[in-house]
Amino acid sequence: MIFIKRRTIAFCLLLLFLAATALLCLSYQTVYAVTVNGEPLLYIKSEKEGKMILDHYLDANKKVYGDSVNFKQDVSLERCFRRSDMEFSEVEQGQKKLQKATELEMEAAVIVIDGEDTVAVKDESTATEVLGEAREEDEAPADNAEILSEGFREEVEIEEKVLDVDAVVAETDAVDTLTGGEEPKLCWEVVYEYTRTLEIEAQIEYVDDDTLAYGTTKEISPGKNGVEEQTIHAVQDQNGNWEESVVSSRVVEPAENQVIARGTGPVFADVSEQIVLGQTEVPISGRITATFGSSGAYWSNRHTGLDIAAAAGTPVRVVSPGTVISAEWSGSYGNMVTVDHGNGISTRYAHLSSISVAVGDTLAFGDVLGLCGSTGNATGDHLHLEVLINGECHNPEEFFNISM
């Protein structure tokens, strides 16, 4: 009887134990948690749902960023016992929570310019494409130009690094980063080589000739321009201007100088010995009152001739054979006659009271061309004599004797 009671008690205890165990199992059912850096982020009821949340989220981002994309944090799926206070997430809801709580990183190709990380793209192939699009081919500076060398002016490298996905840009954006703006970060430089020919300008060589009158010239040899060939290296700067340097040159055909004889002989060789200014009738007998280059109130600059005072009506004679090219009133000069003696030489006779020649008349040495007077800007009767060579006034003393 006692034995039966003991068996009954043992059986009841076993039933009680099994009931407690069942109750405990019901209270602590196995579920799954997605953890971030060891901290639970969300709970799901099955391992399958947990893998769907993680795998679908990563797969969607791999389509955008490539297969190397992964979580920056330590993200895992862990088994745990269910508690009564747990809230469970569906797959779509779980992915949204995962997106907010995590960051993604990926292996990227970084374009490094002069040692500085400049822009990152998804892989080395894309980086190579970006650099290819950043190249800008210049129009050649000449038809015969050949490319000597080409490359970026800057030091450019591609390095693989793990970066946040937000730091990685699309190919077109990377090209804009490198080439856009007023000062592009990359400049493709092409060095061209070409040859060109230049004209070597003939120089003028003067030789003195005492058989020609002073101030006159005569061409002995016309001269000829030469030809030079240059080898040029050219590169275009960022503003589109060509920077050229001459690396070699050779004379294909030398220039021949133009040779010009320059007269050093007397201007009035045939008559100058016969004239003593102011003391002979040629050009007039009288007293010299103003020399060439002197200053005075009646001249705007320096005196351009020689003044010889004489009585009104005294004959004025030509100093050398020539042709009358002007015989008329000439402003401050009054009545004036100009005679052309050839070879660019002419003489002027001013302030005449009257003119006795006409344009075109041919005069011999000593012929009378007018009478002394004070017409124009003159304070008294006198002859104003000028000697011009190629239109420029010269000192008459250089060509005739003078006696003050």
Image (cartoon, rainbow, N blue to C red):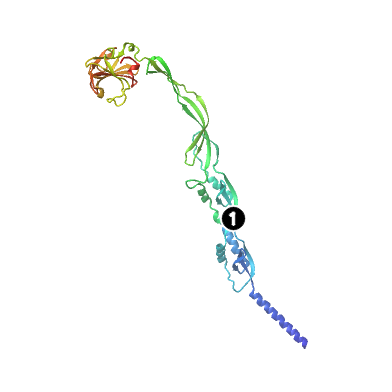
Instruction: Indicate the position of residue 206 as horizontal and vertical percent values.
Output: 43, 19
Instruction: Indicate the position of residue 20 as horizontal and vertical percent values.
Output: 67, 78
Foreground residue among 282 and 51: 282
User: Quick one: quadrant of the N terminus?
Assistant: bottom right
**Residue 321, can we see it?**
no
As displayed, is residue 285 above or below residue 13?
A: above
As displayed, is residue 9 above or below residue 145?
A: below
Foreground residue among 131 and 162: 162
Residue extending farthest to the bottom is: 1
Instruction: Indicate the position of residue 74 as horizontal and vertical percent values.
Output: 62, 61
Residue drawn at x 73%, y 84% is 9
Which of the 4 quarters of the picture holds residue 346? Answer: top left
Label 1: how many Cα within 10 Å (few below 14, some 14–19, many 20+):
many
User: Quick one: quadrant of the C terminus?
Assistant: top left
Residue drawn at x 60%, y 52% is 161
Residue drawn at x 60%, y 51% is 160
**Residue 262, can we see it?**
yes
Which of the 4 quarters of the picture holds residue 14? Answer: bottom right
* Three-letter residue code for mark 1: Met
Apparent side of residue 386 relative to residue 120 in the rendered image (left or right):
left
Foreground residue among 373 and 123: 373
**How many labels, in total?**
1
Look at mark 1 in the image and give the residue it sits on: 106
The local secondary structure at tag 1 comes to strand
Apparent side of residue 30 relative to residue 358 in the rendered image (left or right):
right
Apparent side of residue 222 relative to residue 68 in the rendered image (left or right):
left
Which of the 4 quarters of the picture holds residue 304? Answer: top left
Residue extending farthest to the front is: 404
Instruction: Indicate the position of residue 96 as horizontal and vertical percent values.
Output: 55, 64
As displayed, is residue 184 above or below residue 21?
A: above
